[in-house]
Image (cartoon, rainbow, N blue to C red):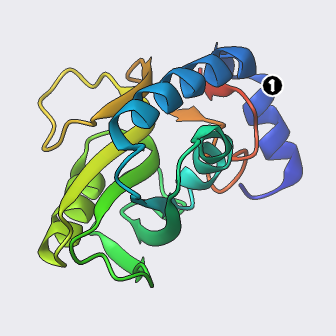
């Protein structure tokens, strides 16, 4: 975003795809499924930054079992609208060897970033890596990865809010919007 006025114009012209209430309900459903599968495993939950932080902040308090948290930062987008080569910005500080990992991210779009992250964690010795995403975009083509836990399905449009940004802005919105 070049300035605040442009950011507000973007939001004012956008269409709400999911409300905060719909998102909260989806996250509660995800939490119940993850609770059932991981309550006895003491998993390492790794959040993909920056997009996954809003989702993680809402999901983690709903999980009622012992777990550890860490993060990693890998991006194909930066502030661009289209993906490029994957940049590894920060790796988890916790040893992943022989750990059951739950990877949290905001969106499964084309799937290249999440697939690369999962493969990297398995290469580092993780016992298992499950992917939980707040949203899965229906792009009408095969993806290199399927999420194990999906909160909501998105249309094939540019979306923002709930961790997803538009030119660096609006990750903080409690709802999900689509560009016109």
Task: Name the residue located 51 percent from the left edge and 66 percent from the top edge.
Answer: 68
Most distant residue in the right direction: 5
Quadrant of the image containing the N terminus: bottom right
Answer with left or right where residue 120 lies relative to residue 171: left
Reply above or below: 178 against 64.
above
> To which quarter of the image does residue 8 belong?
top right
**For this view, does 76 lie left or right of residue 48?**
left
Viewer-proximal residue among 115 and 35: 35
Q: Is residue 177 visible?
A: yes
Which residue lies at the image location 42% right of the left edge and 38% below the top edge?
133
How far across and how far down the image is residue 18, in percent? Answer: 62, 17
- Tell me the SS state at disc 1: helix
* Residue 32 point in image, percent of width and height: 49, 26
Number of numbered discs visible in the structure rendering? 1
How many residues crowd around disc 1 within 10 Å: few (fewer than 14), some, or many (20 or more)? few
In-image side of 141 versus 87 (left or right): left
- Can residue 179 be seen in the rendering of this structure? no
| Residue pointed to by mark 1 | 12
Q: Residue at x 67, y 49 (%)?
A: 57
Asked where in the image residue 7 lies, by quadrant, the reply is top right
Residue 49: x and y in percent read 52, 63
On screen, residue 64 above or below 115:
above
Q: Is residue 173 above or below residue 66?
A: above
Q: Position of residue 91 (x, y in %)?
A: 40, 80
Question: Is 113 or 129 nearer to us in this picture?
Answer: 129
Quadrant where the C terminus sits is top right
**Residue displayed at 37% across by 52% down:** 102
* Quadrant in the picture for residue 50: bottom right
Q: Residue furthest front?
A: 40
């Amino acid at each position: 975003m070049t300035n605040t006025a442009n950011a507000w114009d973007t939001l004012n012209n956008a269409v709400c795809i999911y409300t905060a209430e719909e998102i909260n309900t989806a996250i509660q459903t995800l939490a119940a499924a993850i609770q059932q599968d991981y309550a006895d495993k003491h998993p390492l939950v790794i959040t993909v930054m920056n997009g996954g932080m809003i989702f993680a902040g809402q999901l983690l308090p709903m999980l009622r079992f012992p777990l550890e948290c860490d993060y990693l930062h890998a991006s194909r987008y930066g502030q661009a609208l289209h993906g490029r080569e994957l940049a590894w910005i920060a790796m988890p500080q916790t040893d992943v060897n022989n750990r059951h990992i739950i990877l949290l991210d905001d969106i499964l779009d084309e799937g290249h970033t999440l697939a690369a992250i999962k493969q990297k964690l398995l290469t580092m010795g993780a016992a298992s890596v499950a992917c939980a995403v707040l949203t899965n975009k229906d792009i009408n083509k095969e993806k290199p990865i399927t999420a194990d836990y999906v909160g909501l399905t998105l249309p094939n449009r540019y979306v923002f809010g709930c961790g997803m940004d538009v030119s660096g802005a609006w990750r903080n919105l409690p709802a999900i919007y689509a560009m016109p």
